[in-house]
Image: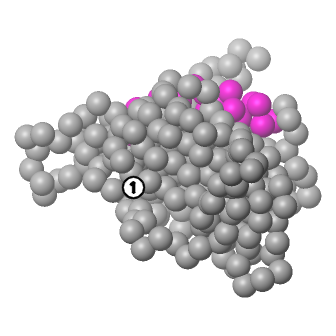
Amino acid sequence: MEFCTTIMEKKTKIQLLYDACRSVFSRDDRLPTFQQIQWLKSILDLFEAVDVGIDEFCSLHGFPASSPRLVNGLFCGQGVSEITYIHVHECNYFSIGIFCFPAGGVFPLHDHPGMTVLSKLLYGSMYVKAYDWVKVDHSGHRTRGVGCRVMNGIQNAPCEASILFARSGGNIHSFTAITPCAVLDVLSPPYSQDLTRPSTYFSDLQIPSLPGYAMLEEIDMPDDFVVSGSPYLGPPVNTKEDLCNSVDIEQGNSSDQSN
């Protein structure tokens, strides 16, 4: 027991998160239990920006434009001018990544088909709007239906991690950054166009006679929505014994430093 405790103490938070995700999600025939999801949430609740290689306070003032966003070996949280995704890991069963937002950055209303999603706001403030389907029609060229609003407010860090499921918790949501901020995301399973899990975007039209409800209709990805990539600079993640998918693992390891 003493030996096991010593090993656990030496693990970084991101390694603990990866190991927990592999334990909970690496099965096709089993949904995670409530206790398992709460365990993952308790790990996410421990995270701060520096645990994933981000300096949330760093300013680029005085640094040359030729080396944007990276200062003293860390990603400069205050230095992003557009939404930026930092890829940590992805396999067939789950993905781990961080979205960094400049103040005013908007991630449009989008869904998470068949997914369990855990999100931790690492720093800053953001306005979140989220819906769950009440009635949905997939029969036409575009998905449309009625959604019930389950979130319409501001999140301020530090705060607990949030959880959403395929049919509850705010599966369709949007983010607007009030200040520079970052969100650590765990998705299971990850998005996949080939496996009918694309990211779909929606417009919402409020229903005046039904406060809290809106007509949601699928739209094309907004032309002005741009997400850039940046390398992961946090502690390395040991995936050598990963049982997910060997091709994805190899790609994930190489892309950890080349997003």
Q: Residue at x 66, y 36 (%)?
A: 162
Q: At which x and y percent is residue 46?
A: 57, 25
Q: Residue at x 52, y 59 (%)?
A: 108
Nearer the observer, 160 or 111: 111
Q: Is residue 48 above or below residue 189?
A: above
Amino acid tagged 1: Thr
Kindly give the residue lying farthest to the bottom in the view shown.
141
Q: Of helix, strand and loop, which mostly describes the magenta segment?
A: helix
Which quadrant holds the N terminus? Answer: top right
The residue segment tinted magenta is: 36-53
195 lies left or right of 185: right
Q: At which x and y percent is residue 106?
A: 44, 54
Kindly give the residue lying farthest to the front in the view shown.
209
Nearer the observer, 240 or 20: 20
Q: At which x and y percent is residue 155?
A: 53, 32
Q: Is residue 223 above or below residue 45?
A: below
Q: Residue at x 88, y 50 (%)?
A: 31
Nearer the observer, 157 or 127: 127
Q: Which residue is mark 1?
A: 84
148 lies left or right of 255: right
